[in-house]
Image: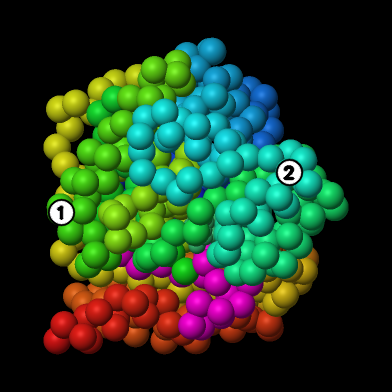
Amino acid sequence: MKALLVGSGAREHAIAWKLLRDDPSLELICAPGNAGISELADCIPVKATDVNGLAAFAERANVDLTVVGPEAPLAEGIVDVFRASNRAIFGPTRAAAEIETSKRFAKSLMSDAAVPTARAEHFTDADAALAAARSMGSPLVIKASGLAAGKGVVIGRSSEESGRAINMMLRDSVFGEAGSEILLEEFMEGEELSIFAITDGTSFLPMLAAQDHKRLLDGDLGPNTGGMGAYAPVSLATTDLIDKVSDTIFEPTLTAMRKANRPFTGLLYAGLMLTDEGPKVVEFNCRFGDPETEAILPLMKSSLLDLMTIVASGGSLRNAPAIEWEKKFALTTVLAAHGYPDSVRTGDAIRFPAPPHGIHVFHGSTARDSATDQLVTSGGRVLAVTGVGDSIEEAAKCSREYAGKIGFDGKQFRRDIGWRELERHAGAA
Ligand code: AMP
Ligand code: GLY
């Protein structure tokens, strides 16, 4: 079997590793990949967003299955293009991907389907938004409606902060087109949880719950990032909670997507807030999360390749058994480059000792220097180090210790990933 994986981050490295674990004879090609993925797969220099280039390659190479990692090619309609020529591809169509790429669409879908989420109103006019913000009070959440690389959300703790954020998006166009429409949203209090479901559009299989850490610094301080670490499973995600999320969130959302003639196939990511009133949706994503995937996949016993093949070829998951998981814990620490998340420096040499048992090193932004073949940093999130252990403490210790041993100038990483779970566990002991 020949598979094409689209993307170049640590998420894609984890997916590549898992697909090859499921079928070591798989012929895997990655576009464009990175230095770590190139040790597992043939990397081809086609950009993830070059949808026509990827489709031409898949035809030429007669690829059996294409798996899409990031949202950008989905938003470009890669699934529509592949399906038009009957090529199996795992992911949602462009119209279905709007559940992530248009917060306005996602909100109105949830409101029509009575899916629990924060109340929100949308605006394109700054004066109208400022007036509404004053009457909605603080704290208030201000969001760019389009894709803003995880940076388009501001929590306005005072009316001055909310006003500044509204002006920045609608008057100063800091996020360009993505911020030409904004949402003002009720602030939800609680703990966040990421739950993914693999779906054929109707039936779905929830995966292990994970928790991401979006702030740059220990103690959840500093600027928002794409994600500095994650762990799985999360003890808050009991069977009852997953059932409730399935019944009140995944089921009605997938039904509403079918009714809207946008059946969602692939991976639906529910970013949740566990409020006093129950789980509510913060956001949906139309693809695997990064870094949650790097924590979840090392624990997955069932074949991801089989499930992706069924969904990509238009089959049904109706009779698929629940996904099986190792009875272990995984914790991922992200190592970021100098200057991340603002002005990232690249080209720093990376050195690390051979990873011990229980450690997975997934490459994010790494490359080989063309002159020296030295491994160097090539973007913001450089490596994801996942420790797997019999307890959350052991997973955390492995991940942190090994993250400390990796050397590159300007390395930034958090030493407290999983702190909430570690506190809960210590409290329960
Ligand atoms: P989003 O891009 O919508 O996932 O938002 C990024 C982050 O902002 C989330 O992970 C939350 O931490 C926070 N956030 C977004 N919306 C809300 C909300 N309505 N209430 C509280 N926090 C929020
Ligand atoms: N971990 C957050 C995201 O993938 O969007």
CB at disc 2 and ligand 1 closer than 8 Å:
no
Q: Which residue is disc 2 drawn over?
A: 128
Query: Which quarter of the rendered picture does the C terminus lie within?
Result: bottom left
The answer to which of 411 and 168 lies nearer the viewer is 168
- Can you tell which quarter of the image residue 141 is in? bottom right
On the rendered structure, is 405 left or right of 231?
right
Residue drawn where x is 68% and y is 82% of the image: 410
16 left or right, relative to 330: right
Disc 1: CA contacts within 10 A as few (<14), some (14-19) or many (>=20): few
Taking depth in this image into account, of 11 and 205 the one nearest to the observer is: 205
Report the residue marked by disc 1. Answer: 239
Q: What kind of residue is marked 2? A: Ala
* Magenta run includes residue 383: no
Q: Which residues are magenta?
A: 214-232
- Residue 423 visible to the viewer: yes
Camera sees residue 2:
no
Return the x and y of residue 412 as percentages of the image width and height: 60, 80
Residue 14: % across, % down: 42, 55
**Could you give the CA–CA distance between mark 2 and mark 1, rounded to whole angstroms?**
44 Å
Q: Secondary structure at mark 1?
A: helix
Q: Which mark is residue 63?
A: none
In the image, residue 362 sits, relative to residue 80, either above or below, namely: below
Mark 1 residue type: Thr
Give the residue at x 51% y 83%.
218
**Relative image position of residue 280 (x, y in whole percent):** 36, 50
Which quadrant holds residue 426? bottom left
Q: Is residue 368 above or below residue 58?
A: below
Label 2: element kind: helix
Query: Which residue in the rendered view is the most extreme toward the right?
Result: 172
